[in-house]
Image (spheres, helix red, strand yellow):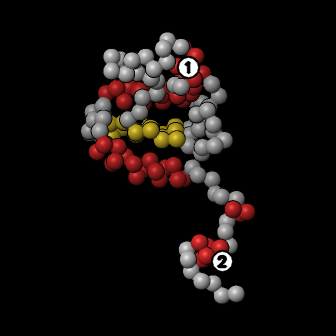
Amino acid sequence: MHHPERYAAAASRSGYYSAIVDRQTGDLYKRNATARRWNSPQWLVAHRRASLPLYLVASRGDHEAMRAMQIMRFAAEGRLPIVTVAVSSGGHNFHVWYEASLAAFEWLGAHLPAPPASHQPDARARHQACGKATAS
């Protein structure tokens, strides 16, 4: 979110968009509101200029992630491109994340810019990189 010039898009599976404060995690930012906001995608989307397209996935069985995704969607509305996907079953687990990965990666790939022509190796360089001999 801080460097849209470096990243074409972002995806999140069962994400939380503000740091949780609980007994196990504690207060990561030690009551520093500025640090908390700076590291909260939810706050950044709602209060700063943001342009990074987002793809968010949550399972209907993960109520916290669903709520976080809905809040993020509301914060992003009209401010940046956002896709939200609600998986019909599951919870906060690797099975849900694995199932959501292919579509997320395809979406991310569709947002990657084409490399500039100057970065395209010629056929000879491609063959040499693969260890194949080329005729001179």
Asked whether residue 131 appears in the rendered view, the answer is yes
Of 31 and 117, the residue lying toward us = 31
At horizontal 37% and vertical 22% (from top left) the residue drawn is 25
Image disc number at residue 35? 1
Residue 93: horizontal and vertical position, in percent?
29, 39
If the image is split into quadrants, where does the C terminus sit? bottom right
Q: Is residue 75 visible?
A: no
Numbered label attached to residue 93 = none
Q: Residue at coordinates 40% horizontally, 52% vertically from top-left? A: 102
Q: Residues within 10 Å of mark 2 (few under 14, many from 20)?
A: some
Q: Position of residue 49 (x, y in %)?
A: 65, 28
Residue, x 64% and y 57% (percent of image)?
114
Q: The disc labelled 1 sits on which kind of residue?
A: Ala
Which element is circle 2 on? helix
Classify residue 74 as left or right of residue 24.
right
Residue 86 falls left or right of residue 19:
left
Q: Residue at x 49, y 12 (%)?
A: 31
| Residue type, mark 2 in image | Arg
Q: Which residue is mark 2?
A: 124
Residue reaching furthest right?
Answer: 118
